[in-house]
Image (cartoon, rainbow, N blue to C red):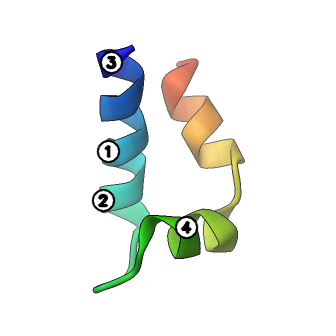
Amino acid sequence: MPDVVEKVLEVYVSQRHEDERFLDTYRRIGLKPFKERVYA
């Protein structure tokens, strides 16, 4: 489970805009990038 959280956070950090919250990033880019990273 910690590996999954780490992968999700890696996507968030690499895709977020400055001062953007996780939920805002998720709404902007959607689920696909997170799923691709977790299941890669």
Q: Is residue 31 above or below residue 23?
A: above
Q: Is residue 40 above or below residue 17?
A: above
Identify the image quadrant of residue 18.
bottom left
Please tell me which of labels 3 and 1 falls first in the chain. 3
Query: Mark 4 Cα within 10 Å, few/some/many (few <14, many 20+)?
Result: few
Per the image, the residue denoted by label 1 is 10
Q: Quadrant of the N terminus?
A: top left
Query: Which amino acid type is shown beneath numbered disc 4?
Result: Leu
Please tell me which of labels 2 and 3 falls first in the chain. 3
Please tell me which of labels 1 and 4 falls first in the chain. 1
Which of the two discs, 2 and 4, sits closer to the camera? 4
The residue depicted at 41 percent of the width and 49 percent of the height is 11
Circles 1 and 2 in contact, beta carbons < 8 Å: yes
Q: Is residue 40 above or below residue 29?
A: above
Q: Is residue 6 found left or right of 23 in the rendered image?
A: left
Q: Secondary structure at mark 2?
A: helix
Per the image, the residue denoted by label 2 is 13
Circles 1 and 4 in contact, beta carbons < 8 Å: no
Q: CA distance from mark 4 to mark 3?
A: 20 Å
Q: Secondary structure at mark 1?
A: helix
Circles 2 and 4 in contact, beta carbons < 8 Å: no
Q: CA distance from mark 3 to mark 1?
A: 11 Å
Identify the image quadrant of residue 32.
top right
Query: Which amino acid type is shown beneath numbered disc 1?
Result: Glu
Circles 2 and 3 in contact, beta carbons < 8 Å: no
The residue depicted at 55 percent of the width and 67 percent of the height is 23
Per the image, the residue denoted by label 3 is 3
Q: CA distance from mark 1 to mark 4?
A: 14 Å
Residue 23, which numbered label?
4
